[in-house]
Image (cartoon, grey):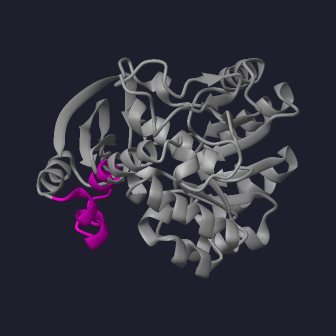
Amino acid sequence: MNVEPFSLPLSSPLETAAATIDSREGFLVQVDVDGVTGLGEATPLPGWTESLVDCETALRSVEDPAAALDSGQLDETPAARHGVSLAVLDARARASEQPLYRYLGGEAQVDRVPVNATVGDGPAEATAAAAESAVDAGFRAVKVKVGARAPDEDLRRLEAVRERCPDVELRADANGAWDRSTAEQLLSRFAALDVAFVEQPLPAADLAGHAALRETVGVGVALDEGVVEHGLDAVLEAGAADVVVCKPMALGGVDAARGVAMRARDAGVEPVVTTTVDGAVARAAAVHLAASVPDVRACGLATGDRLAADLREGVATVRAGSAVIPHGKGNIPPS
């Protein structure tokens, strides 16, 4: 197994719960499975996965990639597991002469998957203008970042978006910023704006609070950080989500994330696939994952523009509100 480090500069700094970062650092992972080469990507993100150092240590400890996956050797290092599992899946999909989404279990021929546009924190007029530009570009779903401003200001921002974009599927992402009282008041008012769902309105630890919100407000509740922190079984047992956000890098690979997505669907909870602002290899795999989920809702896969440089060019591009699936054998065509 070959492990090659990389560093990709961001077009603008990325704020996470753990740090502000200006580049995405990780590792390309190359494996041979029965004479077929596969390529994976391990790109850890502070606050979501293991550290870069722990990721590299885990990767370089692998002697037999398939055995490491089967034994659970990488289960505590999700980004490392993502890199190894993707490389193995890529090799196996190539050997079977299938695109990755079909190898993962997708049954229908799919060329594109719908994606949402993300609008960052900004004043009401700027937020509405950005959402309108996204709709004009072909996006049918727009996610607005909320929680950094006063609650009344966030309400005005969403009101402005709805006024300018009456037909778009409107979502909000609070990143756990609110307490229960604030979330209940805001989501009740968001219902009048036909907001489809709010991601992580409460801190990830508060599964009971999310379950209570679902019972009292007319807006869907999506869990993102909560899925990673607690696992899907606990989320389902608590009745805490209408939607679960599946980040393959944080969940340990596209195979693990697909398991979460399909089990959630079976339980009546809708899955949405997003990235952690990954390079093109992992981003393409996330697109394949989304394509393998029947009738998937718009996913958070339009993240390539966050990178000032990438691992591959022209892969999983976004056009008119959809991500184009890389066709051919495996995950992406060889460079």
Q: Is residue 318 left or right of residue 167?
A: left
Nearer the observer, 149 or 126: 126
**Image point (49%, 25%), residue name:** 315
- Please identify the quarter of the rendering in which residue 58 is found: bottom left
Q: Is residue 102 left or right of residue 188?
A: left
Q: Is residue 192 left or right of residue 2?
A: right
Residue 142, relative to residue 202: is it above or below? above
**Image point (38%, 58%), residue name:** 252
Whether residue 235 appears in magenta in the rendering, the answer is no
Query: Which quadrant is home to the C terminus?
Result: top left
- Please identify the quarter of the rendering in which residue 132 is found: top right
> Residue 239, position in %: x, y?
65, 76
Residue that protrudes farthest toward the bottom in the picture: 237
> Residue 168, position in %: x, y?
81, 34
Whether residue 69 appears in magenta in the rendering, the answer is yes
Query: Which stretch appears magenta?
Result: 64-84
| Residue 74 shows in the view | no
> Residue 109, position in %: x, y?
70, 41
> Magenta region, mostly helix, strand or loop?
helix
Nearer the observer, 177 or 297: 297
